[in-house]
Amino acid sequence: MTIFDQLNEAADFIRQHDPETPEVGIVLGSGLGEFAEKIERAASIPYEEIPYFKKVKVAGHAGKLVMGKVNGRKVAIMQGRYHYYEGHDIHELVFPVRVLCKLGAGKLLLTNAAGGINQCLEAGDLMIIRDHINLMGTNPLKGENDNRLGPRFPDMTEVYDEEMREIIAVGMRELGMGVKKGVYAALSGPSYETPAEIKMLSILGADAVGMSTVPEAIAARHMGARIAGISCITNLAAGISKKPLDHKEVTETADRKKEFFIELLKNTIPKL
């Protein structure tokens, strides 16, 4: 069975729970999943019940697909994601995001928890992703291409949609938040980066670093979706901060910023 057929089967299963087409797909990163509990919900489906989805094992990721509305806008929310370091094949990793596209979500908002590299960033900041650097050592488009999903060589000149980025920036200003934008670098993990690696990333032009999002963005652009991304800067990267890195700090900082994050999404999603 091809990935195209698997996508159709998964999408058909989800439509049995909620037949309404989502306008916006959202992926919630570490510690940010509470937003999905705040929306007008029509259906909540554990990943392991959806054909070809897998159980999420990382702390801070509930592992549910939530279908509902945000101020009247139909959304499909991934409450948690898979990570390459869990041992997933790269195609399995992006399968849920492809399903969001298959369901009809033409716009995607990808969020994550990230380490700050640029010294203008502080723990607790929200950074709009304007571009990314893929250092994961793989690509979700490798292997035989199915033209029904997208072209063999998709353009990545503007992965993160400029208009959507500006809508998010306006939402930040309306909430009295400082607007920070930057480049997100993705590494495979699960070990945190060394100070030497962070110095390298800084030289390459990265403002923040994490272990997700980039494969999803590539796969979604392959299918023609418009994308925006927000990083919650949960800690300063190795060598920037003198403190040892700990995933507990990631989830605690995300939890501390969740009210700002929820308000931003509630105000922004209807305008995307």
Image: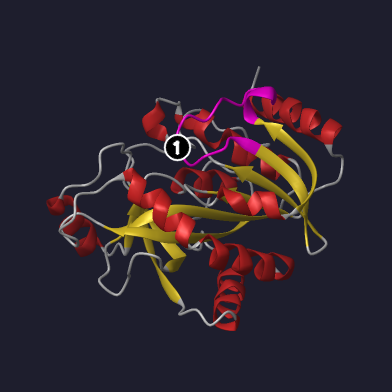
Q: Quadrant of residue 175?
A: bottom right
* Most common SS among magenta residues: loop
Residue 48: x and y, percent?
63, 24
Camera-side residue: 114 or 40?
40
Queried whether the magenta region covers residue 56, the answer comes back as yes
| Position of the C terminus by quadrant | bottom right
- Quadrant of residue 266 within the rendered picture: bottom right
Residue carrying label 1: 59
Q: Residue at x 52, y 62 (%)?
A: 160
- Three-letter amino acid code of the residue under disc 1: Ala
Mark 1: which secondary structure? loop
Task: Residue at the far left: name it.
Answer: 196
Image coordinates of residue 155 in percent, x first then y, are 51, 55
Residue 37 forms part of the magenta stretch = no
Q: Residue at x 72, y 40 (%)?
A: 102
| Spot occupied by residue 136 in the image (x, y as percentages of width and height) | 34, 41
The structure residue drawn at horizontal position 37% and vertical position 44%, both measured from the top left corner, is: 211
Pinpoint residue 114: horizontal percent, then vertical percent.
Answer: 37, 55
- Please give the range of residues in magenta: 47-64
